[in-house]
């Protein structure tokens, strides 16, 4: 059985873009260092929480007080003492810019149930509990699952829908105009390309690899370009070249866009199972060669080369 660390290493790329400020609980309940321990106890009881960040009058983090500290105060009869007398001062905290896998490691290393979150000025801006962490991980995994399941619906089964009017197939060339912006239509071109290649008697494993990469490129046009695009395919007996281009806003930083998990898709797009930040990296995995040409404001051209491999016949 794989260890937790091995599993974390495997899934880490999928969460590369997820930062603490995206899943922390905010605003957070705090207590001032000059308020009484009894007041902190009542806050915990009212809000049903087991720990509070301690701040000064400028909301700067000074410590943390837990139920254990409250119990010690009860035992010593010091509930009316200021929180500063019983709080833990050596606080392990998170920055709101920390990535989620750094949070996982801190929970493993320290064994705490929660961490306060601070901004650049050391103000307390949130709290992260193990529950917050688990919900964030599950939400991200659900997006990936929906994305892969939906893609399989388009390219993982035989598609024999009638060819729409915006397809032009002549000899060894296939063209498809991406002239729609509805997210629900993403993958239509990839499904039709799959049908076209199967009609040319290419083996299904080879075709599926091409269709998956094309699906990802087509989806990127719909989500990110805010323009129309085109899928163009050139076919040889043992080789297929697919070009997907658009006339949209372009990619400002291709190297950053290539990182697994990086995404600029808005939340409403993610709810449909898109925008997981795996599109370009999935293309790279499927294609034998991938070329991306783009700059800000000048659209994107993704060129993908596929050779038939042994075992794909």
Image: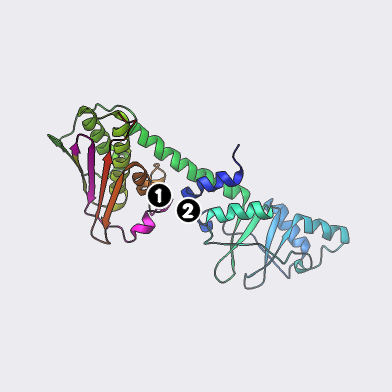
The residue lying toward the viewer, choosing from 218 and 7, is: 7
Rendering coords of residue 234 (x, y %): 18, 40
Q: Residue visible at 33% across and 38% down? A: 212
Q: Check the image and report above or below for 266 versus 119.
A: above
The span picked out in magenta is 235-264
Locate residue 52 relative to residue 179 in the image: left or right. right
- Judging by the rendered image, the residue that carries numbered circle 1 is 277
Farthest residue to the right: give it: 76
Image position of 85 (left or right of 93): right
Which residue corresponds to mark 2? 16
Label 1 crowding class (10 Å Cα cut-off): few <14, some 14-19, many 20+? many
Residue sitting at 51 percent across and 57 percent down?
A: 19
| The quadrant where residue 20 appears | bottom right
Q: Quadrant of residue 169?
A: top left
Q: Residue furthest front?
A: 310
Quadrant of the drawing holding the C terminus: top left
Instruction: Please give the name of the residue rendered at 61% of the width and 36% of the height, measured from the top-left corner.
Output: 1
Q: Secondary structure at mark 2?
A: loop
Residue reaching furthest to the left: 170
Q: Secondary structure at mark 1?
A: loop
- How many C-alpha atoms fall within 10 Å of the one at disc 2: few (<14), some, or many (≥20)? some
Position of 122 relative to 289 (above/below): below
- Whichever of callouts 2 and 1 sits on the residue coming sooner in the sequence is 2
Disc 2 to disc 1, C-alpha distance? 9 Å
Q: Is residue 97 left or right of residue 272?
A: right
Q: Is residue 24 visible?
A: no
């Amino acid at each position: 059985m794989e260890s937790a660390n091995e599993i974390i290493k495997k899934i880490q790329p999928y969460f590369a873009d997820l930062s603490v400020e995206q899943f922390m609980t905010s605003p957070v309940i705090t207590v001032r260092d000059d308020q009484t321990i009894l007041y902190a106890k009542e806050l915990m009881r009212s809000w049903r929480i087991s720990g509070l960040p301690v701040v000064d009058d400028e909301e700067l983090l000074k410590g943390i007080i837990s139920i254990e500290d409250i119990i010690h105060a009860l035992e010593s009869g010091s509930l009316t003492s200021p929180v500063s007398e019983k709080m833990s001062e050596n606080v392990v905290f998170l920055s709101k810019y920390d990535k989620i896998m750094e949070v996982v490691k801190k929970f493993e290393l320290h064994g705490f149930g929660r961490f306060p979150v601070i901004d650049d000025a050391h103000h307390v801006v949130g709290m992260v509990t193990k529950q917050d962490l688990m919900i964030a991980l599950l939400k991200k995994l659900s997006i990936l699952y929906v994305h892969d399941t939906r893609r399989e619906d388009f390219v993982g089964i035989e598609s024999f829908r009638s060819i729409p009017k915006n397809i032009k197939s002549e000899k060894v060339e296939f063209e498809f105009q991406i002239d729609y912006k509805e997210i629900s239509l993403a993958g239509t071109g990839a499904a039709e390309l799959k049908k076209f290649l199967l009609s040319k008697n290419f083996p299904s494993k080879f075709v599926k690899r091409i269709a998956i990469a094309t699906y990802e490129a087509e989806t990127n046009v719909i989500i990110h370009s805010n323009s129309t695009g085109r899928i163009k395919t050139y076919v040889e007996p043992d080789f297929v070249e697919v070009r997907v281009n658009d006339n949209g806003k372009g990619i400002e930083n291709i190297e950053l866009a290539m990182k697994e998990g990086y995404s600029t898709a808005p939340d409403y797009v993610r709810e449909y199972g898109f925008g997981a930040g795996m599109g370009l990296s999935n293309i790279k995995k499927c294609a034998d060669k991938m070329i991306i040409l783009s700059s800000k404001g000048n659209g994107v051209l993704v060129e993908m080369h596929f050779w038939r491999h042994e075992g794909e016949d």
